[in-house]
Amino acid sequence: MPKTNFIARTLPAKLLRVKMEQAPKSIESTKPKSRTMVLAAIIVVILVVVGVGVYILYRPSTPPPTGTPVTIWDNGPCSNDTTCGFKNNTGGSTLTVPTGTTVLWTNTGSLSHTVTACLSTNPGYSAPGACPNGPNSNTSVNFDSGTSGMIHGATFAFTFNTAGTYDYYCYFHPWMHGVIIVQ
Ligand SMILES: [Cu+2]
């Protein structure tokens, strides 16, 4: 009787010990592998992010266009000439430059705008108020940024090689006026 008792008590204990010894082994053998994989993935992600960052910082970029600046601005709605327009460095809408000057318009507003010379062949010329002074006297000089419009941050450059007075407007907002006087 005591013998069978001994076996009955010790066998489950032995089995339990074996199970307890095996269980941690199987966990320990899988953990380092998954940790290594996660670490490798993190390192790859970091390398990719750093690589892209270095590329963006040091890639050869095209130089920004240069010229005498004119700002295209708006206060949102652009419903009349007090909420949007063209202005030079001194705040006026008329810019006087010597012959051969490149003028660079930059749209700082939130809306799309255009720089369109007052010539009867240009789109929007006949819109009420677009060109109150009529067409420019020198009809051979034309500049137009296009009816697709200049979005925020877009620039448009034109070099004035012929003396004269050049009125222009915005195709979308014909009450936006500017003048370039080339001397
Ligand atoms: Cu406009």
Image (tube, grey):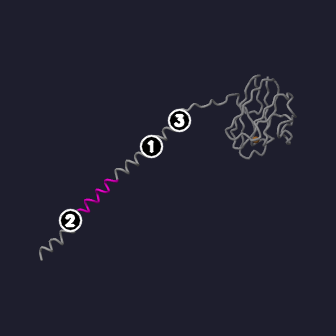
At x 77%, y 46%, the residue is 79
Quadrant (top left/top right/bottom left/bottom right) for the C terminus? top right
Give the residue pinned by disc 1.
44
Residue 71 % position (x, y): 71, 35
- Cβ(mark 2) to ligand 1 < 8 Å? no
Instruction: List x then y, in percent, for residue 161.
Output: 78, 23
The extreme bottom residue here reads 1
Q: Is residue 16 above or below residue 103?
A: below
Residue at point 26%, 63% (across, down): 19
Q: Is residue 165 magenta?
A: no
Kind of residue at badge 3: Tyr
Report which residue position mark 3 lands on.
55
Q: Are marks 2 and 1 in contact (CB under 8 Å)?
A: no
Amino acid type at mark 1 = Val
Can you tell which mark lies on residue 14?
Answer: 2
Camera-nearest label, 3 or 2: 2
Ligand 1 - quadrant of the structure image = top right
Mark 3 residue crowding within 10 angstroms, few (<14) / some (14–19) / many (20+): few
- At numbered mark 2, what does the secondary structure look like: helix, strand or loop? helix
Q: Quadrant of residue 133?
A: top right
What secondary structure do most residues of the magenta stretch adopt? Answer: helix
Percent of width and height locating residue 117: 81, 34
